[in-house]
Image (spheres, grey):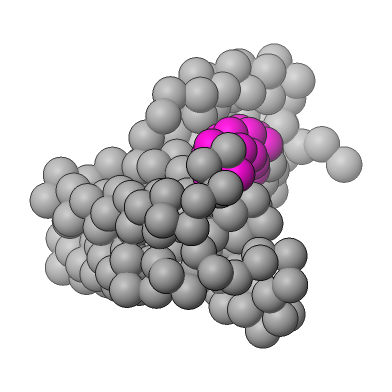
């Protein structure tokens, strides 16, 4: 059952759409993963990242996110962890580019897909700017007179996650399409995989020093 008033929900959807459609670090991560892993790997990463955002929505709704965002040491720790993990994923993509070029993505074992899902989850849950965004933006669209503030924050956060999934999936398909187009040559696939890894590394370093969502 909807809790957020209709006018507030519409205003939030418009604001969220404006934020989501502008390419940012999250889009760069999905593009890098799709170039490195292909269509299914990119979409699995999108799903993993979305699942990683769900706990952040819950934490923000119940006040924990505010504590993290307002504590410089905790916020820095999350930034370092998230950035380091991105760099690790980028390095792994570059190291294993030859294996990626010679592997049929459709035949990967389920364990590999679960690993990719887990990697996307870690990136999603350790994105400090997502916490900051939820803390700063979601409360602006809450109407206390309409009911539980926590439920309204949860609803708004999940709406944002759903919208982001749709947008990120489009980017994943576009990037994977480019990979498939170049896929007639194993050498070109290696280059694209390494390029995707480099994008993720640069993103990790950039997030550490300048932040971003």
Q: Main secondary structure of the magenta part?
A: helix
Above or below for 140 versus 26 = above
- Which residue is at 27% across, 54% downward? 198
Image location (x, y in percent) of residue 48? 60, 62
- Which residue is at 63% across, 23% downward? 13
Image location (x, y in percent) of residue 154? 64, 49
Q: Nearer the viewer, residue 107 or 150?
A: 107
The quadrant of the image that shows the C terminus is top left
Q: Nearer the viewer, residue 181 or 171?
A: 181
* Residue 11 left/right relative to 146: left
Quarter occupied by residue 87: bottom left
Q: Nearer the viewer, residue 53 or 106?
A: 106
As for residue 170 lying within the magenta part, the answer is yes
- Which residue is at 50% across, 64% downward? 101
- Which residue is at 44% across, 33% downward? 137
Of all residues shown, which one is farthest toward the left? 209
As for residue 198 lying within the magenta part, the answer is no
Q: Magenta segment, which residues?
A: 163-180
């Amino acid at each position: 059952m909807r809790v957020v008033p209709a006018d507030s929900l519409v205003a939030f959807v418009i604001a969220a759409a404006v934020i989501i459609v502008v390419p940012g670090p999250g889009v760069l991560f999905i593009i890098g993963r799709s170039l490195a892993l292909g269509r299914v790997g990119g979409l699995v990463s999108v799903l993993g990242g979305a699942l990683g955002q769900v706990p952040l929505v819950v934490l923000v709704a119940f006040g924990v996110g505010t504590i993290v965002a307002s504590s410089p040491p905790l916020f820095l720790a999350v930034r370092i962890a998230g950035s380091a993990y991105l760099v690790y994923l980028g390095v792994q993509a570059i190291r294993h580019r030859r294996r990626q070029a010679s592997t049929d993505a459709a035949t990967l074992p389920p364990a590999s897909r679960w690993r990719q899902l887990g990697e996307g989850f870690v990136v999603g849950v350790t994105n400090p700017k997502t916490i900051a965004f939820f803390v700063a933006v979601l409360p602006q669209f809450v109407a206390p007179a309409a009911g539980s503030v926590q439920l309204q924050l949860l609803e708004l956060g999940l709406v944002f996650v759903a919208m982001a999934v749709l947008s990120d999936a489009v980017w994943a398909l576009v990037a994977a399409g480019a990979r498939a187009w170049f896929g007639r040559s194993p050498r070109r696939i290696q280059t694209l995989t390494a390029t995707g890894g480099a994008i993720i590394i640069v993103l990790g370093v950039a997030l550490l020093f300048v932040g971003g969502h």
